[in-house]
Image (spheres, helix red, strand yellow):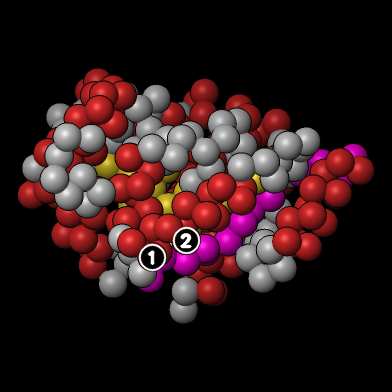
Amino acid sequence: MGKVIAIINQKGGVGKTTTAVNLAASLGFKGKKTLLIDSDAQGNSTSGLGIERNECELSIYDCMSNPDSVEKAIIETKFKNLFLLPSSSDLSGAEIELAYEDKREFFIKSFVDKIKNDFDFILIDSPPALGLLTINILTAADSVLVPIQCEYYALEGLSQLTASIKTIRKKLNSSLEIEGIIATMFDGRTNLSIQVLDELKKYFPDKVCRSIIPRNVRLSEAPSYGEPITKYDITSKGAEAYLSLAREIIHKNT
């Protein structure tokens, strides 16, 4: 049975989608059959893999409406062992639609459970908010990977997120755990990055990933070419970091 990992942070600009795309590609590169689910209405994970979502016949929104359509909605990308369930602009109204539905926390779980055995890893890129879509993601996931930007205010909101995870664990998903906290946009030349990393290790000593994602120009360039860093520049520091993170995740789950 595959491992479902939600990549979540309610703050924007922390490297969440960068982590989702490049960790998924790195897991695939390491030989693990991996599915990336793009649950953000902006669709950056979809475009980051070179796929135009308006050309996709089906999307995650269709799967939420009809869980049996999920296998048809999944796209095999041109990258090794990597598959995608694309986003849809219809997700922008999903929060309102879900609010009036019964069992509204289980729409994503309803189709994820159907395909869980088909993949080694399923990564879910989430929207930057702790709304109903994110609750759906946490209900469907086995664990949570939290990207934290190594800048001022980085820890702000992390306590709220951990509290939300505890609530989900208590009420909706008793097996949910924190997979790890990954430091992103790290610049070892600055005291600030080092201080933030030290604070993370202080408050979450057993959860901070050994791998650290550096600030890297090649990581920033790759999405505009519709490629993960493993394809765009596998020799870059960014590729080395995400391949290291993939090894860490694989080791933890074997």
Which quarter shows the N terminus? bottom left
> Which residue appears at 56% of the width and 47% of the height?
160
**Relative image position of residue 157 (x, y in whole percent):** 61, 42
The local crowd at label 2, few if under 14, some if 14 to 19, many if 20 or more residues have their Cα within 10 Å, is some
Q: Secondary structure at mark 1?
A: helix
Out of 205 and 111, give the one closest to the viewer.
Answer: 205
Question: Which residues are the magenta region?
Answer: 175-190
**Disc 2 marks which amino acid?**
Lys
Q: Which residue is mark 2?
A: 166
Q: Can you say whether 96 is above or below 38 in the image?
A: above
Give the image location of residue 158, x and y in percent. 61, 48
Residue beneath label 1, please?
170
Residue 125 visible in the shown view = yes
The residue depicted at 61 percent of the width and 51 percent of the height is 159
Q: Is residue 12 above or below residue 67?
A: above
Residue 181 is covered by the magenta coloring: yes
